[in-house]
Structure formats: structure tokens, C-alpha cells
């Protein structure tokens, strides 16, 4: 099982998998969509994945 993380940072959003950045953007929506797309590609390869969203505390 792989974990894909969508992390809010001071500069925007990062999508990581296995601690490697696979996508960065300033908008949450596009970043989360990128994580879903990445997870779909892993699923097509037979790899199970979960997506975790981390937001900064207000």
C-alpha cells in the first residue's frame, strides 16, 4: 500500500508519494486532483494507494 499525501505548505500545496514530491501548485483543488490521478495510475499498475490530505492549522 502506497500513501499519497497532499500537504499544504506556506508556499502552496505539494503532492508526495514515498516522500518524493510528484506535483506542486498554489491551488488545493488542482493538487488534490493530481493526487487522484496519480493514485489512478498506481491502481492501473496493480498498486493499492491511499490519499491523505494535510492542511495547516489556522
Image (cartoon, rainbow, N blue to C red):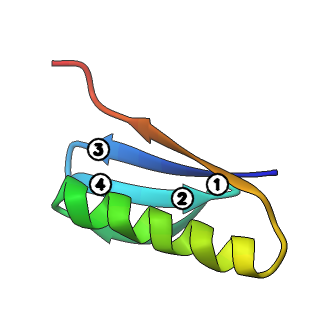
Determine whether 9 is above or below 18 in the image.
above
Name the N-terminal-most of marks 4 and 1.
Answer: 4
> Is 56 on the left or on the right of 34, as rendered?
left
The residue pinned by badge 3 equals 9
**Residue 13: percent from left, percent from top:** 29, 54
Q: Tell which of 43 and 53 is nearer to you.
A: 43
Q: Is residue 7 above or below residue 2?
A: above
Q: Nearer the viewer, residue 32 or 22?
A: 32
What percent of the width, then of the height, locates residue 14?
38, 57
10 Å crowding of disc 3: few (<14), some (14-19), many (20+):
few
Q: Is residue 23 above or below residue 53?
A: below
Name the residue that disc number 4 marks. Answer: 13
Q: Residue 55's quadrant in the figure?
A: top left
> Residue at horizontal 29%, vertical 44%?
9
For numbered disc 4, what is the local secondary structure? strand
Q: Are marks 4 and 1 in contact (CB under 8 Å)?
A: no
How far is disc 2 from disc 1 in space, using C-alphas? 6 Å
Kindly identify which numbered label has been placed on residue 16: 2
Amino acid at each position: 500500500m502506497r500513501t499519497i499525501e497532499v500537504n499544504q505548505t506556506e508556499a502552496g500545496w505539494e503532492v508526495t508519494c514515498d516522500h518524493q514530491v510528484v506535483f506542486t501548485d498554489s491551488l488545493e483543488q488542482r493538487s488534490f486532483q493530481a493526487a487522484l490521478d496519480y493514485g489512478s495510475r498506481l491502481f492501473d499498475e496493480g498498486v493499492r494507494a491511499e490519499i491523505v490530505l494535510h492542511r495547516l492549522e489556522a
